Amino acid sequence: MRKISLDRINDLFAAIAAEFRLYLPVDTNGGARYEEWAEGKILSDELNTVRSAKDFFFPQTENLMDFKTEGKKIEIVDTRSETEDFVIFGVKACDVRSFDVLDRVFLAEPQDSFYKNRREHSLILSMACAKPHETCFCTTFGIDPSAPMGDIVCYKTEDALYMDAKTEKGAALLKKIESITVEDNGEAAEKQKKVIRERLEKLPLHNLTADRFGGDKTAEFFKAPEWKELSASCLGCGTCTFVCPTCQCYDIKDFNTGHGIKRFRCWDSCMYSEFTKMSAGQPRLTQLERFRQRFMHKLVYFPANNDGMFACVGCGRCLSKCPIQMNIVKVMKTLGKGEEKNV
Amino acid sequence: MQAVTREILINKAAELLGNGTVDRVFGWKKGEFSYDVTPALFTTREAMDADFVFGDFCGANFSKYLVAETRKEGKVLVFLKPCDTYSFNQLLTEHRFDREKVYVVGIPCSGMLDTVKIKAVAEGIASVEDNGDRVTVHSLFDGDVTVSRNDMLPDRCKNCKSKKHVAYDELIGEDGEVIDSGRFDEVEKLEKMTPDERFAFWQNELSRCIRCNACRDVCPACTCEKCVFDNPDSGVENKAAANSFEEKMFHIIRAFHVAGRCTDCGECSRVCPQHIPLHLLNRKFIKDINEFYGDYQAGAEVGSRAPLVNYTADDPEPAEAVERSHHDA
Amino acid sequence: MSMKNIENNNETYRPLIVAFCCNWCSYAGADLAGNNRLAYPADVKIIRVPCSCRVNPTFILRAFQRGADGVIICGCHPGDCHYTSGNYYTRRRMSLMFSMLDYLGIERERTRVEWVSAAEGAKFAATMNDFCETVAKLGKNKRLEDLRCKQ
Amino acid sequence: MADMERKREQILRISGVNPRKCMRCGKCTATCPSYDEMEYHPHEFVYMVETGEIEPLLKSESLYKCLSCMACVERCPRGVEPGKLVEAIRLVAVREKGGDRITANDIPALLDDEMPQQAIVTAFRKYQK
Amino acid sequence: MQRIGVFVCHCGTNIAGTVDVAAVSESLGKEQGVVFSTHYQYMCSQAGQDIIKNAIAEYKLTGIVVCSCSPRMHETTFRKTAAAAGINPYMVEIANIREQCSWVHKDTISGTEKAIILGKAAVAKVNLNAPLTPGETPVTKRALVIGGGIAGIQTALDIADAGFPVDIVEKKPTIGGKMAQLDKTFPTLDCAACILTPKMVDVAQNDKIRIFSYSEVTSVKGFVGNFDVTIKRKARYVKEDVCTGCGACTEKCPQKKVPNEFNLGMDNRRAIYIPFAQAVPKVATIDPDYCMMLKTGKCGVCSKVCTAGAIDYKAKDEYVEEKYGAIVVATGFNPISMDKFDEFAYSQSKDVITSLEFERLTNAAGPTQGKLLRPSDGEHPHTIVFVQCVGSRCDSCSEKGKEYCSKICCMYTAKHAMLTRDKYPDTDVYVFYIDVRTPGKNFDEFYRRAVEEYGVHYIKGMVGKVSPEGKKLMVQASDLIAGKQLHIEADLVVLAAAIEPDKSARPLATMLTASMDTNDFFTEAHPKLRPVESPTAGVFLSGACQGPKDIPETVSQAGAAAAKVIGLLCKDKLTGNPCVAHSDEMMCNGCSTCEKVCPYGAITYVDKEFRMPDRTTRVRRVAQVNEAVCQGCGCCTVACPSGAMDLKGFAGKQIMAEVDAICR
């Protein structure tokens, strides 16, 4: 484990940035968000960014290909190029897990070359959550916020940052910054882990369990009468989807530039009435169906196809961002009939 | 602290359910935390006793829900705060629902708390206690923090335009007055900036937009069957802002579409996950309308003619108007 | 030297102006300018609409998105609208719209409304000359551009 | 010539009157209580200012015969406000002369019980710069 | 997918002199949808049109772009060409490369470049064009005339003469209007009653004409050819079909102190009354404000004396609904109130009167049986002062009067002065004028006669003040020509009050969606070329409701309006402009915004049942455009936030395609 004192953290960022594009959470009027580091950018103390870290691999819009038109001629232009290596700093355990969820989708055959390209060129420096929020429930899905995954795991204390390489890529990076860091015995990190685990006990959603859900529950929940009440006040906006680290639906659209077509993909939400409205029309015609789809997907359909892995990481973004305060926790509690894990 | 309690509202609802005036109640349902109340329907006193809440986080404007709610059989009871009643009237003006199917109980409001501001006070909110002038936030790890209640109000409540109900069947408590608020101060501040500063300000704000459509979907003036931005046939459809032009396009046109109809309820800014001050766009239109064509408050009365569907022979010319909105600043 | 200055010094830079003209007055006024051979820059491209009130603010933004540097709307003089009141609505809509664009920091000189009657060929030409010059001085529209459309 | 034009401009600016609005109905003159005292009458003031004949007006005693009762202003159907024009010309004349025709102290001696109150008040306005 | 042909015209050297037409043709040939492109010397010539026709046949064209002169010049020509060759005329678009390109740009490079861009915009538009067919609507062959004065009477008679049924709605108990109150008419000095009453009788006897007297229009719906009008027949408490007009009731009614409005309150009538002897219909009417029976339930004298049994105290207002193909507005005028003109002492002295009151004073059927007597003491006036332009030609911001010239005052004042001097040569008559305006046939001669033969004192100048002193009226005025201030001791002062449109016109205009100017005069569709039509199709204007007019002008305008109505009613069907608004009902949210901006009232709302995307059935309020009424301005399209409203021929997508083409 390597250590660097916090007053020298800028040196660390500068050293990484000398080699890679470095992204880290910074504070803005609208809360924390990932920005490329430059001299003067300060690491945010917020627990989580408003938008999740999925943007790095699956951005909201991205160009897929171009068609150049001239008169009646059309030429197809492949706009793909190899991404440069980049580092994402400060990813929390929940978001790190979300990459596993997304990998299941985008790296399964046929692989999504755009996603894969970025994934392969990334280095993830995760960060343990010193102070989880009341909206956090990652432990429900077996995530340990005190020991996130990633290439390097970081612990930030009052005065120092501790870094522990988990992969070869991570170790290589730590090696590169050896000159500005010092070796550490890991005590401080262990101490913080302990504090975090104690704090988890105090979280209001600590006892929430997903045991009642899983790939085999379609029949049980699909026709549940509770969906009606749960979905009644849903506005059908895409806030939950767009802040969710695991939502991965997209639409492919053409933009006519006047000189040709830019074919791009952009996030879509199963909450939208226009969702998958292709030639056949949207298959889910009421907000109830669309609402149900989102939660059934996360809690039932996705595990069914992915060895029981839930498509929720308990980051709590939807809990704090939903305009009408309806969210996956309320759904789980209502459908699970308030069942909680015995402590 | 709210002047009206949960118990009063439950009793009123039970009375109206009991005497058959209404067959369901649109209210707030308690959530996991003190601040995450959800709009919900109740049909019995028992259900209300169990889950109904009323307090500092019941800010959602219920008027828009009536569009869908009144398509159902029977009559619904809805509790409306003063600002909600303006949206209520505006929707009636636009024939968006049947007045006969709603029973409105006007309730006083002393301003709703801003969850974002509360969360900025402490990390890990266990609960929030309102003691009148002061608000105490009990946090999970750091103990209690007490702050001025006024500081915890969102801009729309700090600059509340009216404590007066402009529509109701019945009123709980005393009705208030229209307030001469400082709601245009922020707009004026922007007007006084140089164009470059204004451009930088909005570029920064709007660049955060993720086009989740929460502002539109919550807006009581946005009740189109299908929004032009969702409609591939409109020629301006766009699902995600692929560049900064489209961010501006969406918000300018949305503000223009609700210009003269927006009651300034502030829901757009409340729900924005990126905290974009969208109400400053709407308020600019309201301020301009007031200055160019005389004071107009959308929703103040049912059936009033909105400024954009009206004119006089001596309205200012566009160049003059733009100039005026500057120098008055 | 900023981008703007470089372009302005470049002699080949000409602004692109989209002019929406109502069929009854301003389009006829433009025709009259033609009949009288009153020159104005070829940068001006006219789109005929039945009435100035047909001009949706979306069209204006669209023009800027696609590369226009200035947009001008011409209609009958207030009170002379062929449809009696169309231009009065135009006047309100555009007052608010232009004020909003200005509020967003977009150069207000890029948009204009002018009332040109069928008899005012000279006014049409003079207006277009003046507008082209004003917009040319501002340089390329950067604040409402869509880079995808510029190739 | 240029001097006259300047004075004309000055009169128009001070009074805010647009003599071109006059349609020559003479209602001002018909209304004027000082008609018999005056060499030039309200409508002539308007007409002469319009045509630029300022000098005779500046020299005329008529300037000081106007009671400033503003009946002409009230009655004018075109809103020309001849009375304001007379006042403006008077002001120009006074400015030109530089000194007061009489001082306030002289007035009590000139007082006459028969004199209407309004005339006294007007005198103050008229003769004091 | 369209198959578009592009035809570039040289217009001799008009276009080809500055624009490289071959380059334009070649460039446009590469555009999307274009399958044929050519250029020719004169496209509008027979040979040029043949090129188009042949190309349509040979290349199976579905759309045409002609790059030529202004569409205002030859759009119709090329549309006809296209129609003759079998394609819809609205599939033609013109790129204006002459007036808006070759004639205003000097150099060939920029001219050619711009011509290509304009051509591309036209091609882009045609790619989105759809064939349009003008709609047809039937015509209800009946006309409504609102107002029963001389304007309404003449219009009704002329329409009826052509064989179409006409209804006249008059709010007073009798038709006749202002003209019935006049004594003589200028410049011929015919007795007004002598020329008007025969026409009133004609109306009464014409079986094509129905009179709804004592009635008002309360609602107008529909559109040209198909108006649905509701008429309120106010309760007159006398059965119109039973009353014989014998007048017995009007003599026996004990309520004698009702101011007689026909004589402008200068004498009294009874609570049951017939306005004047030649009234049409000659039927009594009970004034509910004064009738003791109606107010207190005690009296019933009229009922007792009526041998016909026509009295019905229980009568109620009735509403009649009727369909019309055309509506003529003839609501006329009134003199303005003199209350704000204190300087003329109108409200202080009975002997200061308006010209209309003067008419009654000199009328044989008036309060003085035609003897000119002072209203105050009934004495013969020896000095009469007439004041012209009272309240006319006032400053626009004046609250007292009107900005416009009332037009008729000069002539009737000359008439009054002349008649006074004729009958009473011992009177001195002064007329104070600002200008005397007499541009009608024999008008100036008439005025000169008043001066030269009858010795009326015309004085250039205005009256400044009238003050009652004892029995006299002291008139202070200026004589601008003599440069004098005059002081006249008059016995009678007559004010030529400005006239204004009747107050009922404003609400009526709203019902008709007919536009008005700031003075509440109805606006004509074109001030020169369509002076008797309102901009609202099917609504016509007759008489002073459109602007101040004398009788001959009113009558000629009445005839002109009738001719327009006849022209409309002759048609079995009306063909419209196909470039009209259209509402996508699935998109419409029924908010009424478009309805409010429509200057023609072409948009109505209906509740309709829809099958919604969520499988439910819902009754929704949606906008419907009446294509016969819509004129295609497109105002509603911008007002509509949903984008449900679009304009055929100028659709949002078409205009955006043009924008895109120009900007690319």
Image: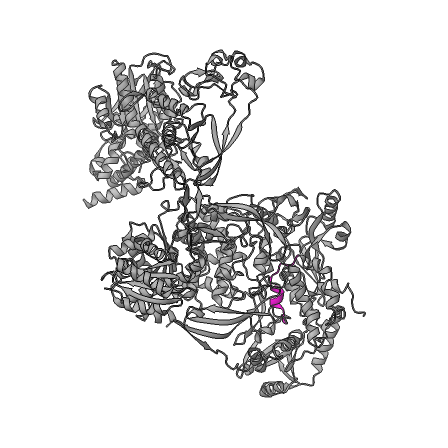
Verify whether residue A241 appears in magenta.
Answer: yes
Judge whether D40 appears above or below E18 on screen: above
Magenta residue span: A233-245
Tell me: A74 left or right of A298: left
Residue found 20% across the figure and 46% down from its top: D2
Outermost residue to the right:
A342
**Residue D68 appears in view:** no
- Residue sitting nearer the eye, B298 or E488: B298
Judge whether E59 appears above or below B318 on screen: below
Judge whether B102 appears above or below E497 on screen: below
Count of residue discs = 0
Verify whether residue B82 appears in magenta.
Answer: no
- Residue sitting nearer the eye, A174 or E229: E229
Tell me: E647 left or right of A52: left
Q: Position of residue E192 (x, y in %)?
A: 33, 21
Quadrant position of residue E15: bottom left
Q: Position of residue A86 (x, y in %)?
A: 55, 80
Quadrant position of residue E420: top left
Q: Position of residue D31 (x, y in %)?
A: 30, 27
Q: Main secondary structure of the magenta part?
A: loop
Judge whether C115 appears above or below D32 on screen: below
Tell me: E601 left or right of A268: left
- Residue sitting nearer the eye, E7 or E15: E7
The colour scheme applied to this rendered structure is one colour
Q: Position of residue A294 (x, y in %)?
A: 66, 66
**Residue C26 appears in view:** yes
